[in-house]
Image (cartoon, rainbow, N blue to C red):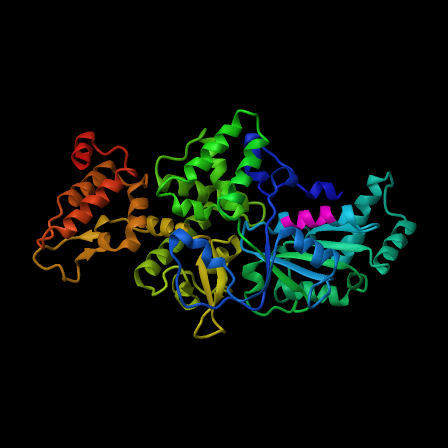
Amino acid sequence: MLSEQLRLTTNPLTSVEGISYRTEQVYVPLGLVERKKQTRRREDVLPEQGSELYRETEIIQTFEHQEFLERVLLQKQSPKSQGKRIAIIGEPGAGKTTLLQQIARRVSGEIPDAVVIWVSLADLRGRELEAYLFEVWLQAVARKVGQAEASNQIKNDFVAQFNQRLVWLLLDGVDEMQATVGNPLGECDRQVRTGSLLQQARIVLSCRLNLWDGGSNVLDSFDNYRTLEFSYPQQVEQFIGNWFGCLPSGEIYTGQRLCAALKESGKERIRDLAKNPLRLTLLYFNWYLGEGKLPETKAGLYEQFVADFYEWKKGQFGTTGEQRKRLNAALGELAREAIDKEETRFRLRREFVCEYLGEPDDADSLFGLALRLGWLNKVGMDAENRRKGVYGFFHPTFQEYFAALAIDDWHYFLNHIPENPSHPDASYRIFDKKWKEVILLWLGKFDISRLLKNQVFSELLNFQDNCGGFYSFKAYFLAAEGTREFREYSEIELDKIIS
């Protein structure tokens, strides 16, 4: 039964193209970090290094993959539980489930008589875990061996295995567990404390960062370890090679071309984004579907990323078209205003997020929905007040994309009033480097008419600053870079820029 759980979690996304993998076919070992406490920092991050948002700053120890399996699980060297209670935490797509799968394979292969039981906690559907093990899991085992139902002997043997401490429970997705009262962490703690058999088992669970760090966490007897991102280029390229290497031989070259494309100048944001296993999967799947090419514009690429992200989440947190529309609009407004007004534009104060998305525990809360889906994640605590959380987008590049979606009028970026540049209605965001990527994404949007984009380029090319031409040149260079996002710009005007 365990083998049925060792499929890649992104298979539901890629299977429409006939691509389904087992974890071991593409797996690249991830390291882990044992945290001292939640991250607390004042400084912002650069979008080209956006994965730094999720980097732990207060740690006890960092483990390579094999070292973690050997020391923590097999040799029971963990400070709180001696390897008996382990939590694997991380943001969406960080490899938590995949690591849990590797733990299952390692334990079942190397510990004699170990009984490894995998439970996707969403499958409990309000049922007690101990009852689920007897009424669902054990019955399925009985049918596997040709019995209509588990006999008393099978049940007694199962109890004996718990009492002999042979049972390993691998509990995937505590954040997906239904809780009648309180939150899933409290429900999990209650069941483990009161379940006489569960107390005898070794438990390794996975949980999203938002829930683990979200507030009251009663699972304080668990040693928690956070997954590390891929290294670039080594692990990113290894993952790409594994994925394309399992396809027909002609696709290996397609993967090599993607590795080469990532090394090109101007791909810094994409390279950083690809350090997360899920985001990398979205990238190379789009590369595969495009037969070795990505969409023509950055906006087109991120539009597809967003659609794929919702599709990947559909099995866990299904959303309606109306919900997605409302959420995307609210995220866009939040993203735009954070870039415009916040001192740390990618590290968002809880109060600031609530202004645009409401309180996370309100009915139909967009904040709560964004957290469940993983568009927003808790990235640490406020340096000035440790009681208040700080949040970030799945990656800063998604924040820039959502911000571009929320801007309808080009004059938000440039509203030149030559006779009075300091007028309240004047806007010169085109000269602020923090808006450059948002502008390029905006130029690549498909819902902006060609006529309007031509007008924008005309304004940039003919901008007169009346102060020596410094800003005129900056506007000119922005137009030159913008032609990559608006390939339909007239060839005559493009020749002017080049010459």
Please tell me which residue is depicted at 61% across the width and 52% down the height of the picture: 96
Residue closer to the observer: 36 or 300: 36
* In magenta segment, residue 414: no
* Relative to 44, residue 155 above or below: above
At which x and y percent is residue 98? 63, 47
Q: Which residues are magenta?
A: 99-106
Instruction: Residue at the far right: name it.
Output: 153
**Quadrant of the image containing the N terminus:** top right
**Quadrant of the image containing the C terminus:** top left
**Magenta region's main secondary structure?**
helix
* Relative to 460, residue 412 above or below: below
At which x and y percent is residue 51? 46, 54
Task: Say whether residue 353 is left or right of residue 103.
Answer: left
Residue closer to the observer: 151 or 71: 71
At which x and y percent is residue 218? 64, 69
Please tell me which residue is depicted at 85% across the width and 55% down the height of the picture: 161
Task: Say whether residue 300 is left or right of residue 68.
Answer: left
* Relative to 275, residue 485 above or below: above
At which x and y percent is residue 205? 67, 57
Residue 68 appearing in the image: yes
Task: Say whether residue 401 is left or right of residue 165.
Answer: left
Q: Quadrant of residue 443?
A: top left
Residue closer to the observer: 69 or 101: 69
Please tell me which residue is depicted at 23% across the width and 52% down the height of the picture: 430
Q: How many marks?
A: 0
Residue closer to the observer: 320 or 23: 23
Please tell me which residue is depicted at 66% across the width and 55% down the height of the picture: 68
Residue 128 appearing in the image: no
